[in-house]
């Protein structure tokens, strides 16, 4: 067999090197902020938004107010680069000015690419993609006092729960903390879900905000992180995340899948609830597979707050891993949303893209390849949040 000409060998080698550099076949999961976002200059996305820009304006204005609480020179990590709080505020004000010009999509994308630095989320190690799920504001019937029907408490944060910043004990613990309780001179892990829900570790301490009738309601309220509790007199209480018990989050959907009780195609919030409602004998077993437990606080009327203590904006708020991504960052996402028929059934999934803001986090949202989109309240929001489980792309923008 004849040898290939030298120039072909050189060209093939160059293509292979370039391709490997752009698409690494083996890459470890990002563990530091510097690894979570990758600067890109070419092959930028087309910045098209499937919603009206009016819905992102309040999200960004709330964001800017959030940043007013920081010193102007405080730095935030955007991948390998640092930007000051002043930079972030000026960037979001510039974006608001840009969308007010009502430009054509092509000109708008050109201006963004010219005036903003764009970073792409590193994604999951095996696919370089981001897995998008969704969450929503659930609504549950509740009572302020326990009765024979409403038996399951929604707890506020206990006074004996302490969060210890381990970074105070050395550089090796930077960014790490533990949740614990102190008994005499001993620091011990806080109570697990099983200890709280089954063994009644917090009973009699007047921590109950309200009572729900189904343990699944409490569990799903904790997964969503916030919700609306409707009382018998027609009034309602909005509750939001206050703290968790420090135990690791474990997916009950994954547990049902691994046990062979549901198939991969069936794992949705709606299907999990249906299965457990039909099999009450395993509810405690399944729920307590997840030792994590969330405590709540009462919010202002109509408010749903994220981890930044900023009201969430349906369709515009995204929850990311707070260890890796800068808080309040301007995002651009590309993934899929459900198409629903008149009977409220999902008939397909369609691609969409839009701008969003990093205003929340969650126990299950870990790594540079996970994102959770807040859908709001109502039947469509519940359907989208319960079934969304699609890969996509996530970008972060900041003014040059």
Image (cartoon, rainbow, N blue to C red):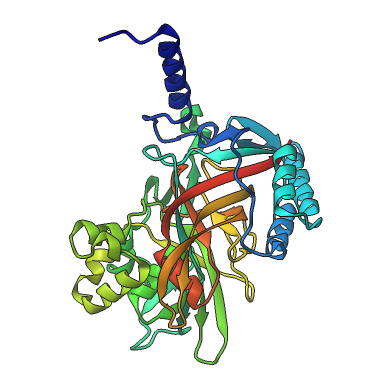
Quarter the N terminus occupies = top left
Q: Is residue 376 left or right of residue 47?
A: left
Look at 24% across and 59% down and name the residue there: 257
Nearest the camera: 116 or 62?
Answer: 116
Pick out the residue farthest to the front. Answer: 2
Look at 69% across and 35% down and name the residue there: 83
Look at 46% across and 15% down and name the residue there: 11
Is residue 218 placed above or below 173 in the rendered structure?
A: below
- Image coordinates for residue 57, horizontal then vertical, percent: 73, 60
Nearest the camera: 218 or 21?
Answer: 21
Q: Is residue 72 left or right of residue 28?
A: right
Q: How many marks?
A: 0
- Image coordinates for residue 34, horizontal then vertical, percent: 54, 31
Q: Is residue 351 left or right of residue 72?
A: left
Is residue 196 placed above or below 45 in the rendered structure?
A: below
Nearest the camera: 213 or 58?
Answer: 58
Kindly indicate the quadrant of the structure image that contains residue 260.
bottom left
Look at 68% across and 65% down and name the residue there: 52
Kindly indicate the quadrant of the structure image that contains residue 71.
top right
- Image coordinates for residue 182, horizontal then vertical, percent: 41, 50
- Image coordinates for residue 26, horizontal then vertical, percent: 36, 29
Pick out the residue farthest to the bottom. Answer: 233
Kindly indicate the quadrant of the structure image that contains residue 288.
bottom left
Using the rendered image of the protein, determine whether residue 336 is visible from the camera's viewpoint.
yes
Q: Is residue 112 left or right of residue 314?
A: right
Quarter the C terminus occupies = top right
Using the rendered image of the protein, determine whether residue 205 is visible from the camera's viewpoint.
no
């Amino acid at each position: 067999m004849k040898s290939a000409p030298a120039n072909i060998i050189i060209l093939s080698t160059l293509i292979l090197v370039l391709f490997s550099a752009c698409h690494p076949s083996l890459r470890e999961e990002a563990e530091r902020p510097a690894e979570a976002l990758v600067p890109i200059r070419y092959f930028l996305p087309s910045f098209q938004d499937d919603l009206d820009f009016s819905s992102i304006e309040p999200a960004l204005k709330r964001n800017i107010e959030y940043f007013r609480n920081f010193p102007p020179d405080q730095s935030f990590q955007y991948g390998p680069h640092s930007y000051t709080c002043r930079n972030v505020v000026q960037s979001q004000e510039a974006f608001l000015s840009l969308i007010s010009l009502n430009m054509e999509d092509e000109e708008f994308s050109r201006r963004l690419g010219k005036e903003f630095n764009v970073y792409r989320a590193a994604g999951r190690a095996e696919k370089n993609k981001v897995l998008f799920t969704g969450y929503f504001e659930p609504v549950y019937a509740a009572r302020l006092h326990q009765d024979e029907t409403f038996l399951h408490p929604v707890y506020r944060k206990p006074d004996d729960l302490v969060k210890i910043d381990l970074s105070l004990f050395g550089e090796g613990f930077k960014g790490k903390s533990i949740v614990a309780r102190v008994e005499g001179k001993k620091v011990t892990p806080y109570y697990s879900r099983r200890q709280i829900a089954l063994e009644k570790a917090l009973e009699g301490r007047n921590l109950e905000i309200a009572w729900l009738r189904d343990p699944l309601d409490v569990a799903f309220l904790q997964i969503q992180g916030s919700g609306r509790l409707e009382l018998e007199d027609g009034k309602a209480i909005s509750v939001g995340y206050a703290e968790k018990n420090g135990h690791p989050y474990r997916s009950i959907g994954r547990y049902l899948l691994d046990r062979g009780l549901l198939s991969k195609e069936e794992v949705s919030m709606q299907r999990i609830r249906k299965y457990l409602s039909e099999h009450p004998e395993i509810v405690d077993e399944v729920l307590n597979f997840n030792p994590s437990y969330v405590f709540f606080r009462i919010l202002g009327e109509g408010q749903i707050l994220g981890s930044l203590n900023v009201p969430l904006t349906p369709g515009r708020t995204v929850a990311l891993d707070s260890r890796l991504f800068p808080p309040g960052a301007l995002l651009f996402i590309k993934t899929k949303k459900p198409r629903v028929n008149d009977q409220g059934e999902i008939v397909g999934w369609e691609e969409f893209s839009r701008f969003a803001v990093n205003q929340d986090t969650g126990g299950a949202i870990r790594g540079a390849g996970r994102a959770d989109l807040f859908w709001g309240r109502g039947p469509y929001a519940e359907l989208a949040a319960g079934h969304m489980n699609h890969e996509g792309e996530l970008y972060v923008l900041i003014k040059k």
